[in-house]
Amino acid sequence: MRNIKYIKEFTKYTTSNIVGMLSVSIYILADIFFISRAMGAYGLAALNFALPAFGFVLGSGLMLGIGGATRYNIKKNQGDHQGANQAFTNTIVLMVGFILFFMICGQFFSESITRALGTDAAIFEMSRTYVQVILLFSPVMMTNMVLGCFIRNDGAPRLAMVAMACNNMMNILLDYVFLIRMELEMFGAAMASGLATFMSLFVFLGYFLMKKNGFRLIRCKLTLESTKRIFGVGLPAFITEISVSVVMVIFNVIILRITGNIGVAAFGVIANILIIVIAIYNGLAGGVQPLISKYYGREEPHLVGLMLRYALVLMTGISTVVYAGIFFGANWIVGIFNSEQNPDFQLLAVSGLRLYFAGIIFVGFNIVLTTYFASIENVRPAHGISLLRGFIVILPMVFLLSHLGGITGVWLSFPLAELLVSGIGGLLYYYFSRRR
């Protein structure tokens, strides 16, 4: 009977967060669908080169939100309400600094950033437009990410889900209006993503107006120790998001050399669907994080372990269903975005989907395990797994395998890297569990 209680609690938090992240998936699919209809394969390639800028904004918001909210949750469950509110206040102060940085970059350095992302002349202006608009919308985007994390840790995961869903449904509507009806091309796509985020803020505003929030701003100093804790706990989430962006840049450059812009467009479909799958895993990990942090703060290690086991079982089920759908539905999936009926694009994207996603169960394992370590403030293994899968393993792997096997080597580098990291992650979990 006790387990039924914890299963219900686990289900409440994780399903709400997964549904919210699935709504993100729908709007990402809508983005690439409308862009492929409005601008064809070159539009997809331009988006793929520009998306790392969006990843940096998203990753920074997740780092501050998860780092600050985890600290808030632990302090709250230890009865230290002053410390909990200090965690929230310090997170907001750090967020303002990041916002100023991104807005300056968007206003003055969008051309330099776009060149650094590796775009060629044919798609440079489309990519630059997307980068500039997204960076200028960073204040509302980062505020959404931070507030969503705190509200989830404040015991209201369903509200965070509703806010995310409203945001994403508005994005789809604006995509249609700006791209199809008004033909604003890449400027319209970026504006749709930016303006839609105001919907989440309106939902969050209701939470504060009804005075349901357990956290508030207080007068306190931002200390070095507090900053280190927020960054330390949130850094794995940042690395996860940033590594997707960095790997995307490297893959784009390698694929451009091997197959040209058609190959980059094919990778654009693969990379965007990967963002969807990672969003689901992040939804699961973000849903279980408040529970792990709560029971860790209450010093109930058996319940911490129980929540981790539930998360891994659910992750395995999700991975099985997702890969089966991708493997058998690859032709249909790619056909949706192949508005020009390009046979080279179709062939590259279909084979890429089937090979690239062969390792998604290892991706899910690595994300859940990283979140587990971060949720109990054991940051060293969390950082280690994130760095291994984000940079240390995947980058040498793609250079080596692309040299040996061309585009097939590029597709295989991702699952092999995640498999290797998951083995190391399992050993780290065993080592630290024995130490405790």
Image: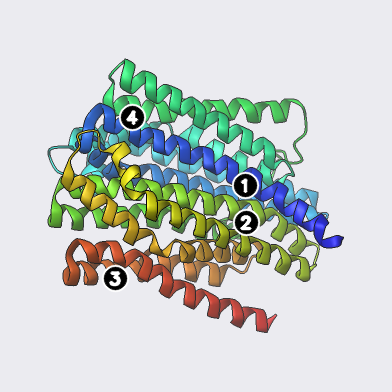
Labelled pair 2, 3 in contact (Cβ < 8 Å) = no
Disc number at residue 90? Answer: 1
Q: Nearer the viewer, mark 4 or mark 3?
A: 4
Left or right of residue 221, residue 113 in this image? left
Q: Please, is residue 108 above or below residue 362 in the view?
A: above
Give, as a three-letter code, the residue at label 3.
Met
Between 363 and 97, the residue placed more toward the observer is: 363
Disc number at residue 397? Answer: 3
Q: Please, is residue 19 above or below residue 417 in the view?
A: above
Q: What element carries label 2?
A: helix
Disc number at residue 226? Answer: 2
Between 236 and 105, the residue placed more toward the observer is: 236
Labelled pair 4, 3 in contact (Cβ < 8 Å) = no
Labelled pair 1, 2 in contact (Cβ < 8 Å) = yes
Q: How far apart are marks 4 and 2 (CA)?
A: 43 Å
Query: How far from the left and from the top, in percent, is residue 192?
Result: 40, 26
Q: Residue at x 56, y 29 (%)?
A: 166
Q: What element carries label 4?
A: helix
Q: Earlier in the sequence, mark 1 or mark 3?
A: 1
Q: Which quadrant of the rendered structure holds the N terminus?
A: bottom right
Crowding at dot 1, Cα within 10 Å, few <14 / some 14-19 / many 20+, comes out as many
Q: Which of marks 1 and 4 is nearer the N terminus?
A: 4
Kindly tell me whether residue 280 is visible in this rendering.
yes
Q: How far apart are marks 1 and 3 (CA)?
A: 39 Å
**Residue hosting label 4:** 34
Crowding at dot 3, Cα within 10 Å, few <14 / some 14-19 / many 20+, comes out as some
Crowding at dot 2, Cα within 10 Å, few <14 / some 14-19 / many 20+, comes out as some
Q: What element carries label 1?
A: helix
Q: Which residue lies furthest to the top in this view?
A: 182
Give, as a three-letter code, the residue at label 4.
Phe
